[in-house]
């Protein structure tokens, strides 16, 4: 692990020192422009990411829910 850590450190230092910092121009971008950019060519990726985030929220809700004794899971009469 020490050798791999040293190699990783060398690679990170080389990458940081090799950056040609030109900065950004500071032009303000509106939320509408960001939305148009995201929903233009990347609409499928945005929709897939939203579905994955929703699924993650549902799973987190179910995993984090406390089990209560006598909790009714269904109101159907035939159960």
Image: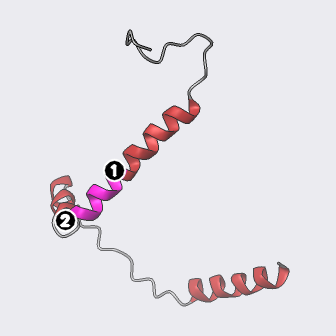
**Mark 1 or 2, nearer chain start:** 2
> Which segment did they paint magenta?
43-51
Q: In this view, does 4 lie to the left or right of 56?
A: right
Task: Classify residue 3 as left or right of residue 57.
Answer: right
7 drawn magenta: no
The N terminus appears in which quarter of the rendering? Answer: bottom right
Label 2, on which residue? Answer: 37
Q: Residue at x 39, y 77 (%)?
A: 23
Residue bearing the label numbered 1: 51
Membership of 44 in magenta stretch = yes
Nearer to us: label 1 or label 2: 1
Percent across and percent down for residue 51 are: 33, 50
Quadrant of image for the C terminus = top left
| Left or right position of 9 against 32 | right
Give the residue at x 15% y 61%. Answer: 36
- The residues bearing labels 1 and 2 have C-alpha atoms spaced at a distance of 19 Å
- Residue drawn at 19 percent across, 65 percent down: 37
Residue 57: percent from left, percent from top: 44, 40
Of residue 62 and residue 1, the one placed in the foreground of this image is: 62
Indicate whether 24 appears above or below 49: below
- At label 2, counting other C-alpha atoms closer than 10 Å, the crowd grade (few under 14, some 14-19, many 20 or more) is few
* Viewer-proximal residue among 13 and 22: 13
Label ID, residue 29: none
- Which one is in front, 32 or 75? 75
């Amino acid at each position: 692990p020490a050798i791999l850590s040293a190699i990783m450190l060398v690679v990170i230092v080389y990458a940081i020192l090799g950056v040609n910092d030109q900065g950004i121009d500071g032009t303000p971008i509106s939320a509408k422009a960001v939305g148009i950019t995201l929903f233009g060519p990347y609409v499928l990726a945005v929709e897939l990411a939203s579905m994955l985030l929703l699924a993650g929220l549902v799973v987190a809700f179910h995993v984090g829910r406390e089990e209560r004794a006598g909790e009714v899971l269904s109101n159907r009469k035939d159960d």
